[in-house]
């Protein structure tokens, strides 16, 4: 008894590439660079030859998937959904939780595909710089009017929040002692010293 393949919905080349990049990214998280075009085709519900009508090589598809993993996309949307009527502490805990999920997923992907750092063009190029600037604005908006209560400029506060969240979310950097969102926010807002002067 043979299994019949469901016919994939007709898509224009841009839509098909978008679908294949998404599928490839999912599979990279499981199989790393060892993912095959057959696996990609099966997951996408297309014939293997369809892949090569939108890209020339598997590596091109893999590179596009990795590039997508480093773009904010849905993360920015989730941050923008944080309720600005919540107290600052609660907003920041939600924010850090979102950032940690993103960092951990990115770290896991990098390990799976054998990357030590993002490719230079994804980290230092004009698009990457613009993305970081935009994300800085989105993070600063979470602080909002409470920026007046900080003893550093809001961009500096956001910079430290990102650094602490990054380090506290990386298993090796944190020596296996990952920080919770609450620990990160409490450190930033309250510090670690007792109330007596140091």
Image: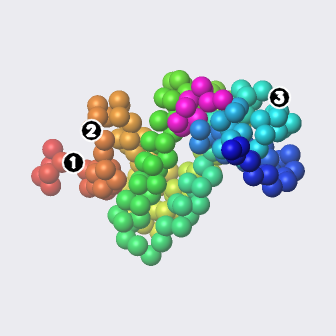
What's the distance in space between the residues labelled 1 and 3, CA to CA?
Answer: 54 Å
Q: Residue at x 84, y 52 (%)?
A: 11
Do tag 1 and tag 2 residues touch (Cβ < 8 Å)? no
- In the displayed structure, does residue 62 sit left or right of residue 151? right
Q: Is residue 157 above or below residue 121?
A: below
Q: Quadrant of the N terminus?
A: top right
34 is within the stretch colored magenta: yes
Mark 2 residue element: loop
Is residue 43 rendered to the left or right of residue 169? right
- Residue at image mark 2: 177
Q: Which residue is mark 3?
A: 56
Q: Which of the 4 quarters of the picture holds residue 117?
A: top right
Determine crowd level at label 1: few under 14, some 14-19, many 20+ residues with C-alpha closer than 10 A. few
Which image quarter holds the C terminus? top left
The span picked out in magenta is 28-36
Circle 2 packing at 10 Å, graded few (<14), some (14-19), many (20+), is few
Q: Residue 144 shows which numbered tag? A: none
Q: Which label is found at residue 192? A: 1
Toward the left, the furthest residue is 196
- Using the image as rendered, state which of residue 141 and residue 107 is in the foreground: 107
Q: Residue at x 27, y 38 (%)?
A: 177
């Amino acid at each position: 008894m043979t299994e019949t393949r469901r016919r994939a919905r007709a898509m224009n080349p841009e839509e098909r590439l978008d679908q294949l990049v998404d599928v490839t990214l999912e599979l990279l998280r499981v199989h790393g660079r060892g993912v095959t075009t057959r696996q990609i085709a099966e997951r996408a519900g297309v014939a293997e030859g369809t892949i090569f009508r939108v890209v020339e090589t598997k590596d091109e598809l893999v590179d596009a998937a990795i590039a997508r993993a480093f773009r904010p996309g849905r993360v920015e949307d989730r941050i923008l959904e944080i309720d600005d009527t919540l107290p600052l502490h609660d907003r920041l805990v939600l924010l850090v939780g979102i950032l940690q999920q993103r960092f951990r997923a990115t770290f896991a992907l990098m390990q799976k595909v054998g990357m030590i750092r993002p490719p230079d063009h994804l980290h230092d190029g004009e698009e990457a710089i613009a993305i970081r600037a935009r994300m800085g604005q989105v993070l600063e908006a979470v602080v909002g009017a409470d920026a007046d209560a900080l003893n550093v400029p809001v961009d500096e506060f956001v910079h430290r929040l990102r650094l602490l969240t990054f380090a506290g979310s990386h298993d090796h950097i944190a020596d296996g002692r990952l920080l919770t969102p609450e620990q990160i926010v409490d450190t930033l807002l309250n510090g670690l010293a007792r109330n007596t002067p140091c």
